[in-house]
Structure formats: C-alpha cells, structure tokens
Amino acid sequence: MSDTRRSYFIRLYARIAVFLACLAACFLKPEWFGILEGDNFFGTFSPLHILWIVWVADMVLQIIPIKNKIALGSQKLFANRFRPIREKINYNALKDYVVSTTKSAYKVMLIWIFLILVIGGLYYGKVIGKMWLFMIAVAFYVCDLICVLIWCPFRLIMKNKCCTTCRIFNWDHLMMFSPLVFAGGFYALSLFAMSLLAWIIWEMCVMIYPERFWEMTNVSLKCSECTDKLCTQYCRKLR
C-alpha cells in the first residue's frame, strides 16, 4: 500500500469517527447545532467550529499548489504538477477528450442536482431540519473517501480509469456542502460559497489548461508514472 493510500485510509477512519460523533451529538448535544442559525457562528463556541476550520483548510489546499501530501488527482490543475509530453500535442484529440469528459461530468452534475432538490424538498416539507441537512453533508464527507478508496458509482458515468485522471476529482466539496445551501446562516453558506469557489477554479483550469487533465498530454497522469496508487484500480496489470 502506498503512503498516499495509507494516509487516505486514516482520513476515512477519521471521517467515520466525525460522523459518529456528530450523530451522537444530534441526540445528546443538540445545542451544538445552534451554530447553524443565522449569525450564531460568531456568538458562541461549538465543537462544530473545529469541523468548519478543517473543512475550510481542506478547500484551501485545493485552490493553492501543494507539491507533497496532496493526491495528484486533486492538484493536477496546477503548473507544478504538469509534465508535458515530448511529442507535439494533438489539439484536436485533446479537444475531443475535453468535450467527452465534460459531457459525462455534467451528467453527474444533473443527477446530483436532482438529489439535492429532493433533499431540499424534504427540508422545506419539514421532514428534516437544519441539523439533518448538516448530517447529510457529514455523510457525504464520509462517502467522498469511500468513492476514492473502495468503489465510486460515478465511474459508471465518467468511464475514467482511476481517481488520478478523474475529471471531477475536486467537485467533492461542492457535492458535500450543497445540501447546506438550504440551511442558510453563515456557517452553512460560507462552506457552500468556499466549495463553489474551489469548483469554479477547477472548471476554469479545465477550460484554460486542458492539457493538464489528460494523460496523453500530461506525463504525470500516466500509470507508469503513478506514485499515489490511490484507488483500487490503480494498476490492474499488477493484480
């Protein structure tokens, strides 16, 4: 197991622990979730402040170039992770790749929007409250790494071979925090706004620097150059 994959498993276990702690708090410490109301973020301290800081830090690491300890799949938008091929780039093939993967990506987006609208319907129908919107976001927080380390349903649509080459790798926080848009308040909306910023930067880089996102133009993304060995399908030839 690679160091990167091992560290991601540790993160997964930590996220499961966070989910269980938050679930317990729903019944034992519901007052913690008062932070979700309006400007209560600035009024009193809640352990959820710590989680907010962790989440914001995670998103900051997605929008600044980091050389080490961050998976290449998340950082491939930056110039310091781009290793151009020696041959001349076939820009027609690159364009076809970008168009194809973007179409697949937005199929995923449409499915996700439908899911979020269902969640919004449950909230406005008073079936669930803000606390459970938060818990859905935390559940997505866990599912994010399950998709990376164990099995990802989005591969059925994206057809990508691994997470390193995934077109939507940095969509994770936008997906996680999209249920919070219905909750309002500084806590929820600040997380959603930050995740939207990370998504916009990613999408802009796909359009401006598409060569960084395709293994046929970025040597770093080739299986032979992989050091992350992050996901379960990282190298079928070795199985």
Image: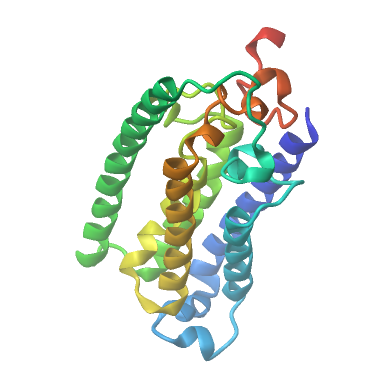
* Residue depicted at 42% across the width and 31% down the height: 154
- Can residue 135 be seen from the camera position used here? no
- Can residue 64 be seen from the camera position used here? yes
Q: Nearer the viewer, residue 47 or 50?
A: 50
Locate residue 102, reporting x and y percent.
Answer: 36, 34
Q: Tell me which colouring the rendered structure shows.
A: rainbow
* Residue depicted at 65% across the width and 25% down the height: 219
Q: Quadrant of the N terminus?
A: top right
Locate residue 145, reporting x and y percent.
Answer: 58, 41
In this rendering, position of residue 192 left or right of residue 86: left
When the figure is inspected, residue 21 is found, relative to residue 13, above or below; the finding is below
Q: Nearer the viewer, residue 236 or 48?
A: 236
Locate residue 96, reporting x and y percent.
Answer: 37, 23
In this rendering, position of residue 131 left or right of residue 13: left
When the figure is inspected, residue 171 is found, relative to residue 194, above or below; the finding is above
Question: Picture quarter containing residue 55?
Answer: bottom right
